[in-house]
Image (cartoon, rainbow, N blue to C red):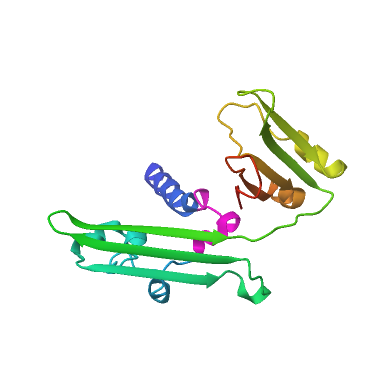
Amino acid sequence: MKKLSAFASAILSLLILVPNVFAVSEAAVLFLLITPNSRAGGMGEAFVALADDASAVYWNPAGLAFQEGKQFTGMYAKWLPQFNLDDLYYVFSGYRQSVEGLGTVGANITFINLGEQTITGDDLAVLFVQPRRDSDTAAVIVIAGTGPTGMRLACKQSLFVPFIRYPDCVVLSTRGLEAGSATVELAGYFGLDWSVENGEFL
């Protein structure tokens, strides 16, 4: 009987604790929480089962199978409108069309403009890579910090450890160190011409 109650206690403890182990923060990529299609947003994002318009491409592509005709949907939303930042916006568009003998095909495009960003502080670490101008295969890795705190943070990053990958550019700060890890202030990839203007950064 004692073994059974100990086993039941262990199972109950696992059921209570396991969901917290797999909890994921969405703070780093908040724009993923923007609901494409205002109708789906108004339904509390409970649109996967319904998915009866052109936005089904995003919510549930299998929903296209039962749609006929053609339809276009679009959405433009200012992101964080309370701050009056005109260069922060989100655009979603979707299109579907039924093709005789084939079924229904659809496509969507999602675009977010994060505007211009300026990051300052004496606790920042910067890691980025650039190709060497005199070589087709070699690259230069730059590790820098803004102040002694930023330099210490930069030196603590694991650069040459297998299975750890970094984007082209990362800016870290010490704000999250109380929780055990640095805060990513900016991360992204340079453009094909290795410029910031043509790159994608979050």
Q: Would residue 15 be seen by someone viewing this image from the given angle? A: yes
Residue 78's x, y, as percent?
56, 71
Q: Residue at x 66, y 42 (%)?
A: 169
Q: Magenta includes 177? A: no
Q: Is residue 31 left or right of residue 123?
A: left
User: Please, is residue 51 above or below residue 186 in the view?
Assistant: below
Q: Residue at x 29, y 69 (%)?
A: 71
Give the residues drawn in magenta, as a range.
20-33
Q: Is residue 68 left or right of residue 13?
A: left
Instruction: Specify the quadrant of the image occupied by residue 59.
Output: bottom left
Q: Residue at x 64, y 47 (%)?
A: 187
Q: Check the image and name the residue furthest to the right.
A: 148
In terms of depth relative to the viewer, which is nearer, 69 or 5? 69
User: Please, is residue 84 above or below residue 28 in the view?
Assistant: below
In terms of depth relative to the viewer, which is nearer, 186 or 19? 186
Residue 124's x, y, as percent?
78, 47
User: Please, is residue 120 above or below residue 147 in the view?
Assistant: below
In terms of depth relative to the viewer, which is nearer, 162 or 64? 64
User: Please, is residue 98 above or below residue 125 in the view?
Assistant: below
Q: Is residue 185 left or right of residue 148?
A: left
